[in-house]
Image: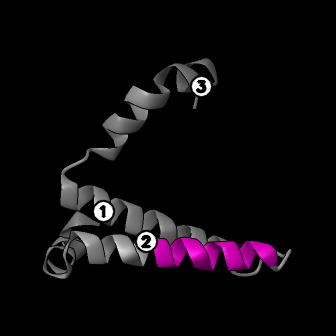
Amino acid sequence: MRKEYFDRDRQRGLFQTFAWLVEEVGELGEALLKKGTDGVAEELADVIAWTLSLANLVGVDVEKALKTKYGEVLARHSC
C-alpha cells in the first residue's frame, strides 16, 4: 500500500485522506443496511485500504499497533 499510494496520499493531505476513510465507512454502513452481503466485502476492503493509507501518513506500524493492543487476545486464540 505504501509503495503504491503514499505519494498520492501525502499530496492529498492527512485530513482529506481521513475524509475519504469516513466516506468509505459511510458506504460500508449503507451496504450493511441493505441486509445482504452484496457490496459489503468491497466496502470493507475500501475501509481497510484507507485506514492503512492514514496509518502510513502518520507513521503508525499497524501490525505493531495491533499486537500492542490485542496481543494477549491473539495469543489466547492462536490468531
Q: Position of residue 66 (x, y in %)?
A: 42, 37
Task: Name the residue tied to disc 1.
Answer: 54
Magenta residues (range): 22-33
- SS category of the residue bearing label 1: helix
Q: Residue at x 53, y 69 (%)?
A: 45
Quick one: quadrant of the N terminus? bottom left
Q: Position of residue 78 (x, y in %)?
A: 59, 25
Amino acid tagged 2: Leu
Is residue 75 shown left or right of residue 51? Answer: right
Q: Residue at x 67, y 72 (%)?
A: 29
Task: Name the residue tied to disc 2.
Answer: 21
Tell me: residue 51, above or below residue 32: above
Amino acid tagged 3: Ser
* Viewer-nearest residue: 24 or 62: 24
- SS category of the residue bearing label 2: helix
Residue 28 on the magenta span: yes
Q: Which numbered tag is attached to residue 78?
A: 3
Tell me: residue 65, above or below residue 26: above
Distance (Cα) linking label 3 and label 2: 30 Å
Badge 3 or badge 1: first in the primary sequence: 1
Amino acid tagged 1: Leu
Is residue 36 shown left or right of residue 51? Answer: right
Badge 3 vs badge 1, beta-carbon distance below 8 Å:
no
Distance (Cα) linking label 3 and label 1: 28 Å
